[in-house]
Image: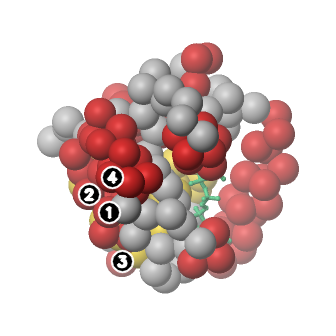
Amino acid sequence: MNSKAIYPGTFDPVTNGHLDIIQRATKLFDQVIVAVAENPKKQPWFTLAERVRMVEAAVDSQKVTVIGFNTLLVDCARQHDTAVVIRGLRAVSDFEFEFQLAGMNRRLSPDLETVFLTPAEQFSFVSSSMIREIAQLGGDVSAFVPTVVMGALATKLTD
Ligand code: COA
């Protein structure tokens, strides 16, 4: 059986923590679709096309496909014939939101299962908004993001 999972997020920008989750997912599934959400309510720093490109450039696996989406996640999963959603759980504080999201997605699409993966310990405190803030204030984020994101942050900050 060809197993497939979808890993949604805003990825504004993608971090090494996200990449760690993607790599773990590729060990469990034959195909992993990284679905970058347009998510206007978060007012992303990077455009959807920029976020998709950064994930594409950072991932080096034949098993991974990167897409952008602006629909309900359940519809995107259905459209890509996927019955498994991957989400990362970094700390207990993530749990409440993730529990709500998984519950609502199951209600909207009863056959959709959410699988939680935990990132390596050194990424358990990384978040995209922290990366943006540190970079904006001149701090070094090179331990937390791939090279392509370092370049994109530098460009964004000199624009
Ligand atoms: N490493 C680093 N950071 C991580 C991480 C990891 N492994 N896992 C989560 N994060 C961080 C992200 O960087 C982000 O940080 P920020 O808020 O500081 O920017 C935060 O955790 C949560 O981000 P993410 O995992 O990208 O989730 P999200 O809340 O931005 O996205 C969607 C949620 C996109 C999955 C959800 O809004 C969705 O499905 N939208 C589609 C529309 C829809 O179906 N809505 C109804 C849902 S019931």
Q: Is residue 79 above or below residue 24?
A: below
Spatial distance from mark 1 to mark 3, Cα to Cα?
23 Å
Return the residue found at the far top.
121
Spatial distance from mark 2 to mark 3, Cα to Cα?
21 Å
Residue 79 image label: 3
Q: Do the numbered discs 1 and 3 sit on residues whose CB atoms are within 8 Å?
A: no
Spatial distance from mark 1 to mark 4, Cα to Cα?
12 Å
30 or 142: nearer the eye?
A: 142
Where disc 4 sits, the SS reads helix
Within 10 Å of disc 1 (Cα), the crowding (few <14, some 14-19, many 20+) is some
Identify which amino acid the numbered label 4 is placed on.
Answer: Thr
Q: Of circles 1 and 3, which is in front?
A: 1
Left-right relation of 18 to 128:
left
Residue 121 image label: none
Q: Do the numbered discs 4 and 2 sit on residues whose CB atoms are within 8 Å?
A: no
Residue at x-position 65% and y-position 26%: 124
Residue named by callout 1: 50
Q: Do the numbered discs 2 and 1 sit on residues whose CB atoms are within 8 Å?
A: yes
- Please say whether residue 26 is visible from this viewpoint: no
Residue 53 image label: 2
Numbered disc total: 4
Where disc 2 sits, the SS reads helix
Where disc 3 sits, the SS reads helix
